[in-house]
């Protein structure tokens, strides 16, 4: 799915990332690396193979776009350090793109750990007419890309049939990206008539 915002071109990917063509910049939000290991540590019956799934998906989306930069819009890691940090180190080392983290509320790992990997950290970024941040906000003169909410939309069918799908949620001045991480929940939003919803349906993105 390709869209244009303020004369800039963007591609919405069914894995939940957004590619800014003019900047060769891939935006990804709410991966929550380490969450599987965190829950397993406290006894949750989460399959061990789920630990590697996020990295396989990251490989897939980077291969599809081959971006110059990858910008994580917060909550890259779910909590404190665990065994998944080593997997992240290996992933960064083999991925031919500059890495940026716009920090979110879950990003509590010491900045020095990221700096050793040449991952640059910012509280927010402004690029041209666009604000890149974790928490949704609107700022005069800027269009915002953000995350945090893990947006989903509820579609009603015949009878009592309904389906809840993760989505890109676009209003007049901002777009909230879906959570990229496999082991994350969603929050159903109710769009107004002015909002645009781009739902992820299996391996495609559709406007609903």
Image (cartoon, helix red, strand yellow):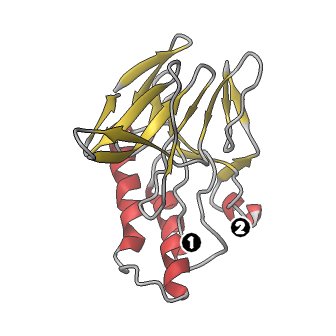
The residue singled out by tag 2 in the image is 109
Q: Residue at x 65, y 70 (%)?
A: 79
91 vs 118, left or right, is left
Q: Residues within 10 Å of mark 1 (few under 14, many from 20)?
A: some
Q: Residue most toward the top?
A: 7
The image position of residue 18, as x and y in percent, is 46, 35
Q: Is residue 13 visible?
A: no
The residue singled out by tag 1 in the image is 85
At mark 1, the secondary structure is helix
- Tell me which corner region of the image, top left, top right, bottom left or bottom right, holds residue 118: bottom right
* Residue 139: mark: none
The image position of residue 77, as x and y in percent, is 60, 63
Which residue is at the front of the view, 152 or 27?
152
Residue 97 higher or lower than 206, as above or below: below
Q: Is residue 48 visible?
A: yes
> Which of the image's four quarters has the N terminus?
top left
> Which of the image's four quarters has the C terminus?
top left
58 vs 157, left or right, is right
Residue 107 higher or lower than 147, as above or below: below
Q: Residue at x 53, y 25 (%)?
A: 192
The image position of residue 171, as x and y in percent, is 57, 24
Q: Residue most toward the front?
A: 159
198 vs 118, left or right, is left
Q: Residue at x 52, y 79 (%)?
A: 39
Dot 1 or dot 2, earlier in sequence: 1
Callouts 1 and 2 close, C-beta under 8 Å: yes
113 vs 40, left or right, is right
């Amino acid at each position: 799915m390709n869209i244009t915002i303020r004369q800039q071109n963007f591609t919405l990917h069914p894995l939940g990332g957004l590619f800014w063509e003019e900047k060769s910049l891939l935006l990804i939000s709410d991966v929550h690396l380490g969450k599987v290991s965190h829950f397993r540590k406290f006894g949750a019956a989460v399959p061990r193979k789920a630990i590697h799934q996020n990295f396989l998906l990251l490989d897939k989306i980077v291969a599809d776009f081959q971006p110059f930069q990858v910008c994580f819009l917060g909550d890259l890691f779910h909590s404190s350090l665990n065994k998944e940090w080593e997997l992240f180190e290996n992933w960064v080392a083999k991925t031919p793109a500059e890495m940026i983290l716009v920090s979110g509320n879950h990003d509590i790992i010491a900045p020095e750990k990221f700096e050793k990997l040449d991952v640059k950290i910012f509280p927010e970024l402004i690029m041209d007419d666009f604000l890149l941040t974790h928490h949704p906000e609107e700022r005069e003169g800027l269009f915002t890309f953000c995350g945090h909410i893990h947006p989903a939309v509820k579609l009603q069918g015949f009878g009592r049939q309904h389906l809840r799908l993760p989505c890109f949620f676009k209003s007049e001045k901002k777009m909230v990206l879906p959570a990229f991480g496999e082991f994350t929940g969603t929050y159903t939003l109710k769009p107004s008539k002015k909002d645009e919803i781009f739902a992820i349906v299996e391996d495609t993105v559709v406007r609903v």
